[in-house]
């Protein structure tokens, strides 16, 4: 089973074997694959995006250890104390700011005493970064279209404090990818997000944002910069 190196590194020092696990924000299921590879007994893969759900369903169609749950992470249809390991791999950077706290509270609710939490995300990009400039255009388009930024990059200590407020104790923080390889396909995908937001804007404004995003992506091509980190925390018994 193919598991990205960043996921394997984040889970390498965790006790996963035989545990009931939850991947919060399943995406393409990379953390689910990592949990299974590490010996998880059962993995709940939770997402509220239909396209992601379809991909996870297809990827793990023959593995009865995986249970796909299509739900908002603020209202997970599981009982209290249901899981022993939770992963959030590249989740918080794509959440609206006002969703972070209620999601942290809900993940704490479904976590059993003694549970492990692994949160992997990206440091804020340096101000002069060309990739950051593209993300800024994406955020501008998203805010104009829906009054919400598309991307928010939290420092590791920020997410540590967020979950610490819900009773989680810090175990370790480590780099799992440094520098981060932002490939041409990554930048193309973010440019496509700008186009999607621009569809609901006046033509002149939308086209201006699209042109700026395309020019930034073309000029950058690809870039190796920034850091992806992993924060591991424990819920007291």
Image: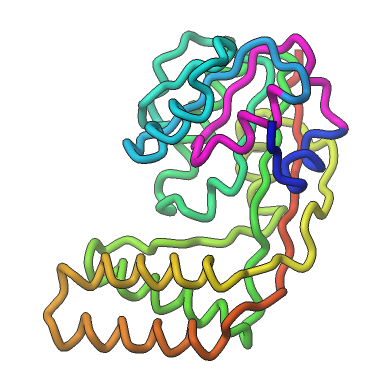
Q: Quadrant of residue 132?
A: bottom right
Pick whichever, 231 or 35, lies toward us: 35
Q: Quadrant of residue 188?
A: bottom left
Pick whichever, 156 or 94, lies toward us: 94
Q: Quadrant of residue 84?
A: top right
Query: Where residue 82 appears, x then y in whole percent?
Result: 57, 10
Query: Where residue 126 appears, x then y in whole percent?
Result: 66, 79
Pick whichever, 39 or 169, lies toward us: 39
- Residue at 53% x, 19% y: name it: 44
- Residue at 85% x, 41% y: name it: 172
Q: Is residue 166 magenta?
A: no
Q: Is residue 21 magenta?
A: yes
* Residue 196 horizontal side relative to residue 96, left or right: left
Q: Is residue 150 above or below residue 217?
A: above
Pick whichever, 197 or 164, lies toward us: 197
Query: Where residue 192 appears, x then y in whole percent?
Result: 36, 68
- Residue at 57% x, 29% y: name it: 23
Range of magenta residues? 13-36
Q: Is residue 67 above or below residue 72?
A: above
- Residue at 47% x, 35% y: name it: 103
Q: Quick one: quadrant of the C terminus?
A: top right
Q: Is residue 126 above or below residue 234?
A: below
């Amino acid at each position: 089973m193919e598991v990205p190196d960043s996921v394997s590194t984040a889970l390498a020092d965790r006790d996963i074997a035989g545990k009931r696990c939850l991947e919060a924000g399943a995406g393409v299921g990379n953390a689910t694959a990592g949990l299974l590879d590490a010996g998880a007994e059962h993995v709940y893969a939770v997402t509220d995006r239909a396209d992601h759900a379809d991909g996870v369903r297809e990827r793990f169609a023959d593995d009865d250890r995986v249970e796909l749950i299509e739900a908002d992470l603020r209202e997970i249809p599981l009982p209290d104390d249901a899981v022993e390991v939770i992963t959030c791999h590249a989740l918080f950077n794509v959440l609206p700011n006002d969703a972070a706290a209620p999601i942290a509270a809900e993940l704490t609710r479904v976590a059993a005493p003694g549970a492990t939490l692994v949160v992997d995300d990206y440091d804020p990009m340096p101000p002069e970064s060309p990739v950051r400039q593209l993300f800024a255009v994406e955020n501008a388009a998203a805010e104009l279209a829906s009054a919400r930024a598309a991307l928010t990059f939290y420092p590791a200590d920020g997410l540590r404090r967020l979950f610490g407020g819900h009773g989680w104790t810090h175990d370790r923080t480590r780099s799992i990818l440094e520098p981060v390889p932002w490939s041409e396909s990554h930048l193309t995908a973010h440019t496509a997000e700008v186009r999607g937001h621009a569809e609901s804007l006046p033509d002149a404004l939308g086209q201006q944002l699209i042109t700026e995003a395309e020019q930034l992506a073309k000029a950058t091509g690809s870039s190796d910069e920034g850091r992806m980190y992993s924060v591991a925390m424990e819920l007291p018994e």
